[in-house]
Amino acid sequence: MKTSRLLISGLLLAGLLQSPAVLLAQKAEIVSLQRDVGQLDTKLRELKTAQTERMDAVDAQLKLMVESNAKLNAAIAALQKNLSDTVSAIGTLNEQQGKQLLTPMATVSTRVDTMATEFSALRQSVDALGQQLRGFDTRLNDLNNTLRTVSAPPPAPPPSATTTAPAPSASTGAPPGFSATATFESAYRDYNSAKYDLALEEFRTFLQYAANTENGPKAYYYIGQIYYRQEHWDDAAKAFDAVLERYPENSWSPDALLYKAQSLMKDERNSEAIAEFKSFIAKYPGDPNRARADMYLKSLTAAPAKPSSPRNKKRN
């Protein structure tokens, strides 16, 4: 027991002897620790400051994005309004242009009709010239035959010959002195001189006695042209139809069919006109007037066809 007490006392004494050094070491550690804590605090403040600056920068960027988005939305709204206004303006302009084009289109259509009529008249003049040349050739042959007959010696009469009349030819009911060629040429001259009433009577007279000759379809065609120019659409359609029905597939059939369709169109019998234009295109796809038929057919089928109701706007 006494030894233990001595040992403990010795240890305490040794500890007391060494305490200043221990205290100094501990104090140094505490100072070092305080220095580290100070540095750590400084770094924490720096980090906090940097974080605050970053947050401020992010907030500024967010504000800019919000402002930019608002400006973009405003620009999009303005663009949509401008687009809507532009579409409305284009629609109004198209409607106005459509109305403005009606008159030029009608003028073009009238001009096309006039040109077609002039072309037909030119072709008719060429045909008439050819017919006149053929008539001159016939008359020249008749004159040559007459000269040969006159220059030949007369045959001696038989001893007991009796004078007999020539056998009568098949009667056509024509009045004495009627000439189919002269009547047709006279009617055609009056037609070209715009003496339509006189030409109409002469063509009718020709058809009464010589409808089955080569000029028969021409006479009906010119009658149709007279009615067409006088805007007697129903009578014109009937005359052109006579060319097609009485003289099938002659050289005048294409023009007769086209003008029949145009007459029906002018008379507002659109469904019948559409059928005739389609028939013309199907029968004569290579005809020079194909484009004109296509144009009329397109104009008729662009709007609902009106029901056929024969109406003759101008009649005698």
Image: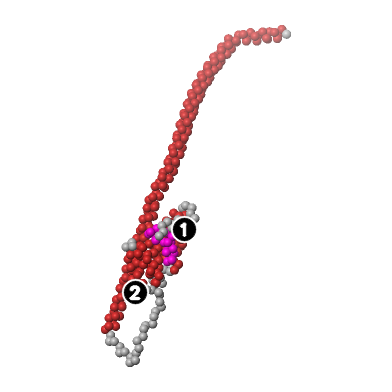
* Residue 165 placement, left or right of 42: left
Inspect this view and state whether residue 56 appears.
Answer: yes
Q: Residue at x 44, y 68 (%)?
A: 246
Q: Nearer the viewer, residue 251 or 17?
A: 251
Q: Which residue is mark 1?
A: 310
Amino acid, disc 2: Gly
Is there CB contact under 8 Å for labels 1 and 2?
A: no
Q: Position of residue 232 (x, y in %)?
A: 41, 59
Q: Which residues are magenta?
A: 227-243
In this picture the colour scheme is secondary structure
Q: CA distance from mark 1 to mark 2?
A: 41 Å
Residue denoted by label 2: 177
Q: Secondary structure at mark 2?
A: loop
Q: How many marks?
A: 2
Vertical position of residue 315 compared to residue 51: above or below? below
Magenta region includes residue 19: no
Of residues 20 and 209, the one nearer the viewer is 209
* Residue 43 vertical position relative to residue 82 in the rendered view, above or below: above
Q: Give the answer, above or below, for where 310 lies relative to 215.
A: above
Q: Position of residue 53 (x, y in %)?
A: 48, 23
